[in-house]
Image: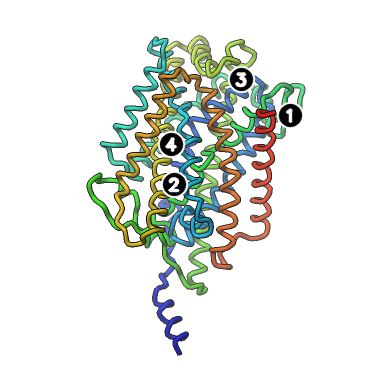
């Protein structure tokens, strides 16, 4: 009798799986995750590789972003079904995981390579030689924006949509104007791994650079996991019933009860039908916005870099190839267009650093909250204060590195990317296991999807091991 009563109470706590909206209303979260990758892989590393090795490595960019599509969808799957971030789910199975996410996120993204690149490009436009002071000013400006602006999801979504919808077409037009038919042919061949005198990897390529670019073909590192936060913030699937954490970052003085755990639904035919419709729609949204627009962005940027800088001695020195691109564009078309290109690149990089600082601080703040609630589930938390501590701690770390003259953007980006590639290896395994253990059977990934995730997991593990071995021995 007690069992029946218990089941009845449990059943009353079930929520209905919400109805899915139209596809148009779904578009949003993928813009954020795409924009977080614009400043690393898309704007810097893959164009750098094209400038130095040609377009034969384009297959790596396509495979990298395809891998990230599947990674992100498994992260979204958890949030859609459980109405909570993947961090909460992982912490249920691995109690020490929040410490790992805080440490790996801070180290991986605290290295200020993206803002260093933005500052160096901007400094070249205005004629400032010591760009580290511009980088420090940019970092502090981002801190001020996040501290005094509305650090909510909506603001980030509007900014990123604008940057992508203006920046990507601009790059596309330049690539079309400056490229010839042979260049497009070289790009098409590169997508299947055929380069100028090599297949897949050219002789002399630095494995760490390739792994860094591969990891950043999209967002990379723990930033992939923010997809679960954005799904929840938008109220997708069971996220409709969740507390919107973004709103808790608004007031430094208020401690509030933070509800991190989601809700459950009963596996009825109606609820499962709704889940499948949601899954189909968010899969399509991520395919169109993240995979397709992301792939186009990388291809156009690689093509533009190839036609303007390939074979030039300027390409080997850090991110000077970007500045050289602007010079060639100005020389070939007209000077103002070359300057405009550099300004657009600088803005895209600045916006990426803004998004990265916001997202990483959210990741670390949520994981601190998870550990606090583990000790005392009723404790009120000042999530805003924790968030801002991480924002300014990362800024202080970056400023310190600049003052110590660790300023070369490419070096900082590659180092951070290699660390983040290993972080991806870890979180792919944790996410896959969490989905296997915690999701209802009817919502778990099928065999093909599980095999794809296993291949991706082994790839990042193997490649990370090879790079670390190469650097250590």
Mark 1 vs mark 3: in front: 3
Q: Position of residue 384 (x, y in %)?
A: 30, 45
Q: Mark 1 points at which residue?
A: 194
Mark 4 vs mark 3: in front: 4
Q: Which mark is residue 420?
A: none
Task: Name the residue rendered at 70%, 28% in the picture.
Answer: 473
Q: Where is residue 452 in the image (x, y as percent from the top left)?
A: 66, 51
SS for callout 3:
helix
Cα separation, mark 2 vs mark 4, equals 14 Å
Task: Name the residue rendered at 36%, 37% in the picture.
Answer: 391
Cα separation, mark 3 vs mark 2, equals 31 Å
* Contact? badges 2 and 4 (CB < 8 Å): no
Using the image as rendered, state which of residue 2 and residue 210 is in the foreground.
Answer: 2
Q: Residue 356 carries which label?
A: 4
Cα separation, mark 1 vs mark 4, equals 34 Å
Q: Which mark is residue 29?
A: 2
Extreme-front residue of the structure: 375
Q: Earlier in the sequence, mark 1 or mark 4?
A: 1
Cα separation, mark 1 vs mark 3, equals 16 Å
SS for callout 2:
helix
Q: Going by the image, does 388 lie left or right of 329?
A: left
Mark 2 vs mark 4: in front: 4
Q: Where is residue 100 in the image (x, y as percent from the top left)?
A: 51, 45
Mark 1 vs mark 4: in front: 4
């Amino acid at each position: 009798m007690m069992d029946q009563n218990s089941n009845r109470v449990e059943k009353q706590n079930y929520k209905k799986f919400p109805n899915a909206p139209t596809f148009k209303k779904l578009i949003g979260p993928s813009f954020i995750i795409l924009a977080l990758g614009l400043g690393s892989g898309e704007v810097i590393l893959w164009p750098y590789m094209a400038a130095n090795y040609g377009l034969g490595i384009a297959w790596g960019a396509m495979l990298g972003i395809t891998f990230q599509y599947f990674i992100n969808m498994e992260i979204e799957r958890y949030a859609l079904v459980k109405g909570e971030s993947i961090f909460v789910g992982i912490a249920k199975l691995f109690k020490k995981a929040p410490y790992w996410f805080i440490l790996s996120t801070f180290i991986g993204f605290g290295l200020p390579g993206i803002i260093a690149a933005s500052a160096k490009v901007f400094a070249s436009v205005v004629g400032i030689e010591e760009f580290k002071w511009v980088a420090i000013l940019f970092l502090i400006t981002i801190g001020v924006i996040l501290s005094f602006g509305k650090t909510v999801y909506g603001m980030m979504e509007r900014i990123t949509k604008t940057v992508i919808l203006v920046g990507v077409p601009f790059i596309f037009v330049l690539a079309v104007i400056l490229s010839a038919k042979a260049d497009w042919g070289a790009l098409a061949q590169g997508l299947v791994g055929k380069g100028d005198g090599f297949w897949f990897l050219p002789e002399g390529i630095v494995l760490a650079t390739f792994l860094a670019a591969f990891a950043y073909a999209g967002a990379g590192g723990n930033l992939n996991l923010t997809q679960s936060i954005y799904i929840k913030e938008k109220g997708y699937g069971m996220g409709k019933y969740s507390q919107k954490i973004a709103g808790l970052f608004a007031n430094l003085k208020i401690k509030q009860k933070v509800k991190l755990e989601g809700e459950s639904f009963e596996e009825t035919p109606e609820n499962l039908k709704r889940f499948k419709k949601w899954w189909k729609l968010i899969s399509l949204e991520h395919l169109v916005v993240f995979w397709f627009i992301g792939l186009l962005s990388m291809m156009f940027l690689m093509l533009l870099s190839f036609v303007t800088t390939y074979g030039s001695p300027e390409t080997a020195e850090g991110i000077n190839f970007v500045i050289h691109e602007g010079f060639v564009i100005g020389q070939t078309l007209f000077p103002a267009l070359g300057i405009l290109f550099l300004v657009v690149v600088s803005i895209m990089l600045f916006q990426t650093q803004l998004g990265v600082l916001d997202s990483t601080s959210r990741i670390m703040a949520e994981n601190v909250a998870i550990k606090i609630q583990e000790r005392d589930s009723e404790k009120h938390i000042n999530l805003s204060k924790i968030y801002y501590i991480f924002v300014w701690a990362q800024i202080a770390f970056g400023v310190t590195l600049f003052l110590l003259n660790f300023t070369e953007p490419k070096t900082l980006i590659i180092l951070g990317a290699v660390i983040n590639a290993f972080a991806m290896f870890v979180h792919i395994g944790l996410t896959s296991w969490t989905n296997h253990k915690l999701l209802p059977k009817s919502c778990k990934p099928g065999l093909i999807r599980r095999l794809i995730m296993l291949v991706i997991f082994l790839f990042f593990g193997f490649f990370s091991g090879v790079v670390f071995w190469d650097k250590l021995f």
